[in-house]
Every structure is written in structure tokens, then in C-alpha cells.
Image (cartoon, grey):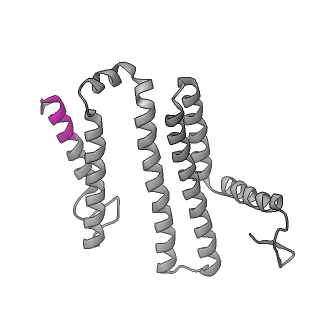
Amino acid sequence: MQNFEKGRVVKPDRFIDSVNCAIEGIIHAARTEKHMRNHFISAVVVLLAALFMRVTVIEFALLALSILFVLFAELFNTAVEAVVDLVSPDYHPLAKIAKDTAAGGVLIAAIGAAIMGYIVLSKYFFPLYGKVLAMFGTPADMGTVVSVLVVIIVVIMIKSITGKGTPLEGGTPSGHAAVAFSIATTVSLNTGDPLIS
């Protein structure tokens, strides 16, 4: 890893210097990126919840890996943005693609972490609910999560092919309508009552 001092490149000679450079990068991201600070706050909340709920070692490992992956993705996104700004200070379509793609990686990592957190912690928040669902084999809420994720992926694929509208507004199909319909259909199937949805 290289560092810059007084306009010249300085390569750390000691391992501790390399670690210091890495920590400086993390501190810089936390200082300059609001999303990074939000991720750190969320990580603290989840870890404290895991501590007080006494999750198993495997569950804690899954939560920790999910948190670390989100933080890694955000750090990588910050690095990509810095390099893009250095190489292309003016607007360029390719620069936008690079930044948007890196941000998309963070979004996917965050969604994955949220799903993992829900799967691990929900049974501690709702112990009775978890026991009832366990009696019926595959939890019904898993079907909801899977169906919504599949709908989102399909909508993204179709929008990437048609090129109409933005990811969150306009174009066909409507992501909002598709997700809402997916949730309503899943609720109707799980409850057996279409009026509830």
C-alpha cells in the first residue's frame, strides 16, 4: 500500500504503517460519507441486539459477516468514487456508470444484510411467532421475501432491456406496482382471504 507525503509516493516499510493507512481510509470514509456512518450505527445496534438476545455462535458469525460485507462494499464504493473524481473531474457518462454500479453493489450488500438480520433476529423478537411458523415447515414469511426479491430482480432486468424510465420512477413495468402486487398476492395465499390484503 502506498501513501503520499509532500507530493511524493511513500510506501510503508512496517506492517503497522500499512495498518495505519488502512485505518485512515476507514476513518476518512466515516468522516466524509453519511452512508458509512449510518452503516456503522446500524452495525452497533445489530451487534448489541445480538449480545442481549444471546444468539448462537453461528448466528453471530452470519450477522458479523453480513455487517463486514456491507462495510467493505461501502469502502469500495468510496474508493471508486475517489478514483473516478480524480480521473474524470468533469461529468462523463462512463464516470456515472462506474459510480452507480459501485453504489448498486452497496445496495445489494445492504439488502442481503437486512435479510440475514431478519432471518437471524426475528425469532428472538417474536419467539411465539417463530415457534408457530416452525410447526409448518418452511416459514410463510420466507415466501414473501423470496417473491418480492424475484419481482425486484425481474423488474430490474426488464428495465435494463427496455431502457425506459429511471429505476424508481416511470417506465414499464412499474416497480412499485409489481412489488405491491407481489406482497398482496402472497398475503392472500398465506391467509386464504383475499380481502385481508
Residue drawn at (25%, 30%) of the image: 137
Q: Relative to residue 149, is residue 184 drawn left or right?
A: left
Report which quarter residue 143 is drawn in: top left
The x and y percentages for residue 139 are: 28, 33
The x and y percentages for residue 193 are: 12, 29
Residue 188 in magenta? yes
Task: Note whether residue 197 is visible.
Answer: no
Residue drawn at (44%, 24%) of the image: 125
Rendered position, 13 above or below 151: below
The x and y percentages for residue 148 are: 28, 47
Is 62 or 128 nearer to us in this picture? 62
Residue that sits furthest to the front in the current view = 58
Q: Quadrant of the N terminus?
A: bottom right
Rendered position, 21 above or below 61: below
Residue drawn at (24%, 45%) of the image: 180
Residue 61 in magenta? no
Is 45 or 134 nearer to us in this picture? 134
Rendered position, 16 above or below 94: above
Q: Secondary structure of the magenta portion, mostly?
A: helix
Task: Note whether residue 180 is visible.
Answer: yes
Residue drawn at (62%, 74%) of the image: 83
Report which quarter residue 160 is drawn in: bottom left
Q: Quadrant of the C terminus?
A: top left
Query: For the magenta stretch, what is the residue range?
Result: 184-194
The x and y percentages for residue 74 are: 57, 57
Rendered position, 97 above or below 44: below
Q: Relative to residue 195, is residue 74 drawn left or right?
A: right
